[in-house]
Each structure stands twice: as structure tokens, then as C-alpha cells.
Amino acid sequence: VNFTYQFLSKKFYVFSQFLFDEHIKSYLNRENRWYRKHKKDANVDHMYPFDRALKFNKDIRRLGQTKSGLSFLGQFRILITEIGNALGYVRMVRSAGMHWVADAVQFVPDIDKIPKFLEKNQEFSSSLISAESEKSCEIFDSLVADLSGKFAEGTDYLKVLVDVFQQVMLNADGSDHLSNFSIIIPSLVINFIEASMQSKEQMARSHKGREAYFTDDGFATGVAYVLAILKQGRDFDALHWFKSVEEKFTKEIIDVKDAISSKNKELDNAKKSYKKSSSYFGFGSSKNSETLFTKEEIRKMNDEIAEMKLSGKRLQSTLKEYRMFMFALSGARSFLQDADDIIDDADDNPIGTPEISVDETIET
């Protein structure tokens, strides 16, 4: 825990410097003002627009990129991922320790009623025991007491790491810029989803024909941890970000399905017209009253439908990635969320559960 604290201290210094940057701070202040002013508009409806978060991703790339193509926002995302992975390390070590203690304590008959071996030995012995035996009994009693104490220990190290940084970051002078963190999360999520899908595609190409798995929950854990430290869980929930994402992609998927259906009807009519015009070498066909299609035009229609289906599949995959991240973030927040941060009103949708669920499948 001490090692993790030192590691996180360095990371949070960089975290604060990024949010204090004049360009970042001015943008986030502007977005906060815009959302407070327009959140009740009919076209916003208390949901932070996806397009505004996407625009920031594009704008920040103009400030420069690393040799590997990472923007400043991408580097900030990696920083938060490292913070989340540090918490995962603490939890992993803690779980490993509990596993070892559980294996060792299984030889104690009753963990709740552990008699003192030295006292029992003196009680049942007719004569005084030797000094060596007494020392052995004392060591045995201390070992059993240590095992039972560690097994019953209820220290929540994640909460400790939350509390210690809360005292530093919320009470420090000049920490107003940290209040903007919640409004940058939508842009960070877009950046994470894009990077995640790109990594999965690269892995699929490099491991073609072999079994491979991809997972990255460090970013979700890092976001949940920072929200808990800065007490901005309610501020982020008020953006209704995941509902905004759900509605945007659902609408686009439905539009693609409608376009495919319309194009399929047009293709069917084209095929019928082509067959009719080509039968009997054109004799008896009503060429002057119907629009006839060539093979090239029909092929072009097929290509357009194939492109639409590919686009629809891409939209469905992207929406699935956002949903999986939403569930990962909700799970991480459940470990770190205080009772005061839980919103009782179901309409506020604190964990971001989608109110709209459209599982339409674009047929191949």
C-alpha cells in the first residue's frame, strides 16, 4: 500500500498539471458553462451530446502527437489507466494474502473460539511444564492469533487510498481546476473506445487462426477511483452520457437498416426489370414505359448494400464496446462509491443503465 501511495502521488501530480493546462482548462470551463445553459433544451434533454465530446478529441490532436500517434488526451487516458492498474495491483496482492491465510487457518477447529494453548496445558498438566515447553506454547498461541487476526481483518485498502488522496486534493489551495474532471470523461471514453477497437483489430490480424483474448479494465477502474476521490460521481451522472451514446448509435443503426431495406427493394425491382428486358431478346418488353437497369448498375447496387451492412456492423460493434465499458465502470464504482453518492431517484440512472435497448442485427 505504501509503494502504491508513492506511485499514485507522482501520477496525480501529472494528472493535476494536465487539467491545469490553459487550453484544457478553458475548454472544460466552456463546456461546463454550455451544458449548464443548454441542458434543458429539447435537443439536449439533460444529455451531454456525443458530437461535442467527439469534437474535443479532434481538436486536441491539432496541439500535437507523439511519435506513436498519441494525442495529449490519449496520454491522459493512459495516465488514468495506470492509476486504475495500481488499484488492481493492491487488490490482487490483498486477495493473494487472504487466499494464503485462508489455506493456513483451515487447520484451526473454531476460528471464533480459539483457546490459549499455554493455559490449557497448565490446566491439565499435573506438574509445571518446562521453560522450553512454555516458550513453545507462547509462540504457538501468537501464531494462531496472528492468523485469525489477519483472516478477520476488514481493512478496506481501496477506501484508505481514496480517503488519503481526498484530504490532499480537495483541501489543497488552487485545486479548482480539478472540478472539471467529470466533463472530460465523455471525450476520454471516446478516446478509449477508439484505441480499444484498434487494438482488438490489430490483435485479430496478428493472431489470425489462433485463440486470443483482449481485456483492459484499468481505465474504467481509474475513472471510478478519480470520481470517488474528487466526489464528482453525481456530476458525471448528471451528464447522462451513456444514455446519450445509446440514443445516438441506436438511431444510426436504425437509419442504416432502413437504408438497406430501401436499397434492397430498389435492387429487386432492378433485377425484375433487367430479366424482363433481356427475355426474348427484348421482344414484347415495355422498354419505353419502364426504367431498365444494366448489369453494371445492379452490381453497383449490390456493392452499396454491402457497404451499408459493413457500416451497420461497425456501428453495432462500437455500441457494444460502449456498453461493456459502461458495465465495467459501474462495477468499479460499486467498490469505491460512498452511500452519499448513490442517487435514489431511478430516473437519474446513476450507473448509466441504458433506457433504450435495440439489439437489431444487420444481416450479412
Image (cartoon, grey):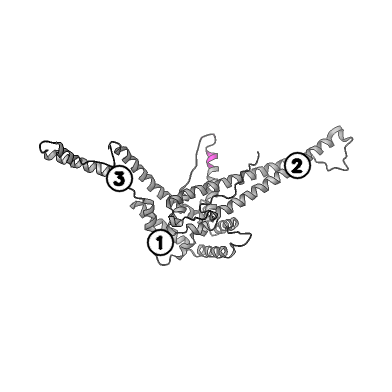
225 shown above or below 152:
below
Front tag of 3 and 2: 3
Q: Residue furthest right?
A: 284
- 347 horizontally vs 169: left or right: right
Question: Tag 2's secondary structure?
Answer: helix
Task: Tell me the amino acid under the disc marked 2.
Answer: Lys
- 198 horizontally vs 224: left or right: right
Q: Which residue is mark 1?
A: 169
Residue positioned 12% across, 40% down in the render: 131
**Mark 3 → mark 1, Cα distance in angstroms:** 31 Å
In the drawing, what numbered circle is on residue 26? none
- 71 horizontally vs 12: left or right: right
Q: Quadrant of the C terminus?
A: top right
Where is residue 2 drawn, in percent x and y?
33, 52
Residue 228 visible within the image: yes
Mark sitting earlier along the chain (1/2): 1
Q: Which residue is mark 2?
A: 265
Q: Which residues are magenta?
A: 202-213
Residue positioned 83% across, 35% down in the render: 278
Where is residue 218 drawn, in percent x and y?
45, 48
Residue positioned 54% across, 36% down in the render: 208
